[in-house]
C-alpha cells in the first residue's frame, strides 16, 4: 500500500483562438486550467484537472492547497475514503461550488494513479463496456451569423461528426427558430441536432421555446433554465414536449437525484471536473441507469470518453467548443461519428508542459 508523498498544483490562463459567446456567460476570450499531480511512495503518478472561464480559478486553487495537509501520507488507493474526508472537511461552507471542483481535480488524479498502477486504461478499470462512443460537436456559436454557423457545421461534418449541438437563447425566440430551421434544412431529417440555452430562459419562456423548436426534431434541449429550479425542469420537460439534457451546473450527486425525482431530465450531463470527480460521475451514471436514463457528458472530452466507454447507459460524448488539443500529446479524434477511448494506461491525457508553460499564472491573490 503506497502513500501520497507529493501534490503539485498549477494554474494556467489559456487564450481562446476565437471569442465564444452563449446565452449567459458573456464573451469568453480565455479559460483557466488547474492541474494537480499526485505522486505516491512507489513513484507512481496521477494527473487531475479542471477548467473554468472568466478567471474564476482562484478559490478552487486555494481549496486544493488547503486539502494537501489532509491527503499527505494517506493511502493513495483509498479513493472513496479520501473523497469523504475532503467532502466533510469543508461540509459547512461547501457542499458544491468550488469545493466540488477542487475535489474533482484530486479525485481524477487519484483514479488516474490507481488505474496506472493496475496497468489498465481508465475506461477498462472503471467497467470496460465499449471503447467506441458516439460523439457530437458542441458549438459555442450564439452570435455567429448564419453563414458562420453553416461554415462551422460544414467543418464539423468534414471532421467526422454525425451529430451537432448549437446554441439558442438569442434576444428573440424567432431568431432561434430561424437558426434551428436553417440548420435542420442543412443537416437533413434524422441528423441528431441538439440545442443548448445555457440557462437563458425563465420556465414559461423555456416552455414556449421548447414547443416552438420541437417541430425541428431536436435531439435534446439543454439547460433551458437555472439549475436550481428542479420543479421548473419538471414542467419544461412535461409541457415543452422535448427531451431535456442538464447537469453541467450540478455539483453534487444529490442534485442529480433531485432533478431525476422532478422528472426534469432525459439526458444526464455530469461534468467530471465539477461534479465531484470520477467517484461522483460514476455514481450519477449508475443512478441514471437505475432510472432508465442515459448519461452524456460536458467538457473535457479527452477524459470523459473513458467514463462513457466504461458504462452501459452511455449517450453521446460532447466534443466541447474549446478543448486542450494544443496542450496534450494525443487528443481524442472523431471518426465516422465515434470517439474511441484510448488504450494508454490511466486516462492517458498527457500534458505538454512546455506548450502550457507560457500561460502559467503565478499565484498573487
Ligand atoms: Mg451546455
Image (cartoon, rainbow, N blue to C red):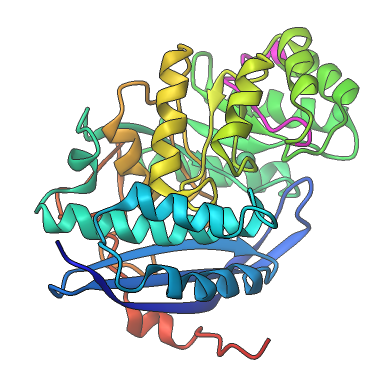
Question: If the image is split into quadrants, where does the N terminus sit?
Answer: bottom left
Q: Position of residue 22 (x, y in %)?
A: 73, 48
**Which contiguous range is marked in magenta?**
214-226
Image coordinates for residue 166, horizontal then vertical, percent: 63, 37
| Residue 324 visible in the displayed image | no
Q: Is residue 193 above or below residue 142?
A: above
* Quadrant of the rendered image containing residue 200: top right
Q: Viewer-proximal residue, 110 or 28?
A: 110
Q: In which image quadrant can residue 246 be found?
A: top right
| Residue 40 is one of the magenta-drawn residues | no
Residue beneath the point at 74% across and 25% down: 230
In this view of the protein, which residue sits in the foreground, 358 or 182? 358
5 displayed left or right of 273: left
**Overall secondary structure of the magenta section:** loop
Residue 347 appears left or right of 140: left
Residue at 18% x, 39% y: name it: 124
**Against 51, is 240 above or below?**
above
Q: Which of the image's four quarters has the C terminus?
A: bottom right
**131 or 258, which lies in front?**
258
Where residue 262 sits, quadrant-wise, is: top right
Q: Is residue 218 magenta?
A: yes
Amino acid at each position: 500500500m503506497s502513500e501520497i508523498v507529493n501534490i503539485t498544483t498549477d494554474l494556467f490562463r489559456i487564450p481562446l483562438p476565437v471569442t465564444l459567446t452563449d446565452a449567459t456567460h458573456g464573451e469568453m476570450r480565455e479559460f483557466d486550467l488547474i492541474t494537480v499531480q499526485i505522486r505516491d511512495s512507489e513513484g507512481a503518478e496521477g494527473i487531475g484537472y479542471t477548467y473554468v472561464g472568466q478567471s474564476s480559478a482562484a478559490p478552487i486553487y486555494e481549496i486544493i492547497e488547503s486539502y494537501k495537509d489532509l491527503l499527505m501520507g494517506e493511502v493513495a488507493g483509498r479513493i472513496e475514503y479520501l473523497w469523504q474526508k475532503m467532502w466533510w472537511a469543508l461540509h459547512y461552507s461547501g457542499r458544491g461550488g468550488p469545493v466540488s471542483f477542487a475535489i474533482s481535480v484530486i479525485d481524477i488524479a487519484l483514479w488516474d494513479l490507481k488505474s496506472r498502477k493496475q496497468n489498465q486504461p481508465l475506461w477498462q478499470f472503471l467497467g470496460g463496456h465499449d471503447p467506441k462512443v458516439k460523439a457530437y460537436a458542441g458549438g459555442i456559436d450564439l452570435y455567429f451569423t448564419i453563414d458562420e454557423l453553416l461554415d462551422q457545421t460544414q467543418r464539423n461534418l468534414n471532421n467526422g461528426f454525425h451529430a451537432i449541438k448549437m446554441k439558442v437563447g438569442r434576444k428573440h425566440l424567432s431568431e432561434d427558430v430561424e437558426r434551428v430551421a436553417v440548420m435542420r434544412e442543412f443537416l437533413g431529417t434524422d441528423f441528431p441536432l441538439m440545442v443548448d440555452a445555457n440557462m437563458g430562459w425563465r420556465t414559461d419562456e423555456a416552455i414556449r421555446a421548447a414547443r416552438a423548436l420541437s417541430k425541428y426534431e431536436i435531439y435534446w434541449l439543454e439547460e433551458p433554465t437555472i439549475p436550481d429550479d428542479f420543479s421548473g425542469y419538471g414542467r419544461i420537460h412535461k409541457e415543452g414536449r422535448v427531451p431535456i439534457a442538464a447537469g453541467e451546473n450540478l455539483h453534487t450527486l444529490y442534485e442529480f437525484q433531485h432533478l431525476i425525482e422532478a422528472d426534469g431530465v432525459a439526458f444526464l450531463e455530469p461534468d467530471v471536473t465539477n461534479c465531484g470527480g470520477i467517484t461522483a460521475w460514476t455514481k450519477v451514471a449508475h443512478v441514471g441507469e437505475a432510472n432508465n436514463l442515459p448519461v452524456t457528458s460536458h467538457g473535457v472530452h479527452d477524459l470523459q470518453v473513458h467514463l462513457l466507454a466504461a458504462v452501459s447507459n452511455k449517450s453521446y460524448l460532447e466534443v466541447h467548443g474549446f478543448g486542450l488539443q494544443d496542450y496534450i500529446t494525443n487528443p481524442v479524434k472523431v471518426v465516422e461519428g465515434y470517439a474511441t477511448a484510448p488504450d494508454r494506461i490511466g486516462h492517458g491525457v498527457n500534458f505538454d508542459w512546455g506548450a502550457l508553460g507560457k500561460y502559467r499564472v503565478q499565484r498573487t491573490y
